Image: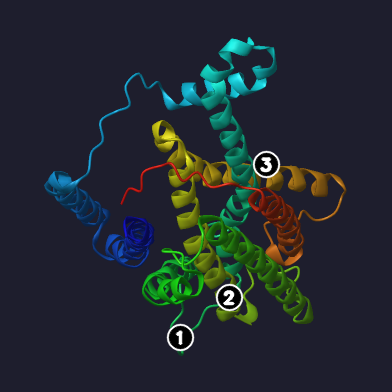
Amino acid sequence: REHAARSSFFNWWYFCLAVGTTMALGGVGYIQESFGWAIGYGMLCTTVLCAAIVFLIGTSTYRLYTPTSGANNPVMLLARSIVSWLVKETRQEEEAAAIAKEVEEAHSMLHLLSIWAACLSYGMVFAQIMTLFNKQGRTLDRHIIGCLELPSAALLLFGPATILVFVPFYDRVLVPLLRSMTANPSGLTLLQRLGSGIAMSLAAVSTAALVESRRLKVAREHGLVDVAGATVPMSWMWLLPQHVMMATASVFAEVGMQEFFYDQMPHEQRSLGLALYYSVLGIGNFISVFLISLIDRITRSAGGDSWFADNLNRAHLDYFYCLLAGLNAVGFALFLWRASSYAYNNNNKMLC
């Protein structure tokens, strides 16, 4: 019962994040531009104060655990376990029983870290939502009705809006349906959910490559290749599939990563497990920036147009998306390989 409740908690936690993002992009931004930044910041300050009050009111309901006696810093525990695993052959035989637990934890941690490495491909794709996806939207026809035109940043709302719709559907419809089929309290296993998200991000970036290829084709057909800042006669709705697919992928992958790393870490290292989830997104952004800088330098040095030229009609974001799709496919293959031999750690207490 608690296992199912915990999975549901992570779903609704992510739902609340999407609510906050939607309100920030759609509401607070409008108020700041229309009524002043002071009012907008005042709203945000009030919201944070209210959240802090709600948090404090709820402290009496939290389940607290007594820290493990003699527990060290989780990073030190990880390092000590890995060292024990590396030198296990050189230790005295009589010490084998004493280090058995450390060796077992180290082996489990190395398996976890290999799955973490496979998830970095998702982080690289996720980094494009706020950057290149948005840059694409600026070149398209964003008119809705008559002279009413969407700001390019408004396209970013479709991701959180998709999450707001999909999370209730997933938690209340899809999970019970899958539960009846798989007998798993969460519907899918932790790795099945995580793998579904990585696969969907692969589909999303592949779709983005196809859409960008079409956008460049339309720009060539209308003689807009050399017209910087021109609006390509192509509807903004062509970008909806990649935004919707990435938002759906995030419900599977990001919530799946949180629950997986939290659940499978040794009890004393659970805080490190949550850090692994955030590091996937952070390092994924760093890798994306490194690739863009490297490719931009290489393509410029060849004398041609950079893949990331300021004039997107002369750039080749489609090539970059294809590269990301290839890297994501390699990451997904690594994930399937490591997940196929993964043995779940069922010794952890099930926390809500």
Residue with the mark numbered 1: 147
Q: Tell me: 122 left or right of 48.
A: right
Q: Nearer the viewer, residue 233 or 109?
A: 109
Distance Cα–Cα, label 3 vs label 2 = 27 Å
Q: Amino acid at mark 1?
A: Cys
Residue drawn at point x = 65 percent, y = 18 percent: 88
Residue drawn at point x = 72 percent, y = 73 percent: 210
Question: Going from the N terminus, do you reach mark 1 or mark 3 first?
Answer: 1
Residue with the mark numbered 3: 290
Q: Tell me: 318 left or right of 128.
A: right
Question: Going from the N terminus, do you reach mark 3 or mark 2 first?
Answer: 2
Vertical relation: 60 (above or below) 1: above
Quadrant in the picture for residue 30: bottom left
Task: Give SS at disc 2.
Answer: helix
Distance Cα–Cα, label 1 vs label 3 = 40 Å
Q: Are marks 3 and 2 in contact (CB under 8 Å)?
A: no
Residue with the mark numbered 2: 241
Q: Position of residue 103 (x, y in %)?
A: 58, 26
Q: Position of residue 146 (x, y in %)?
A: 46, 90
Residue drawn at point x = 77 percent, y = 43 percent: 297
Q: Tell me: 30 left or right of 311.
A: left
Q: Nearer the viewer, residue 108 or 297?
A: 108
Task: Give SS at disc 1.
Answer: loop
Quadrant in the picture for residue 69: top left
Q: Amino acid at mark 3?
A: Phe
Q: Are marks 1 and 3 in contact (CB under 8 Å)?
A: no
Q: Amino acid at mark 2?
A: Pro
Q: Nearer the viewer, residue 324 or 276?
A: 276
Tell me the colour scheme of the image.
rainbow
Q: Tell me: 253 left or right of 114.
A: left
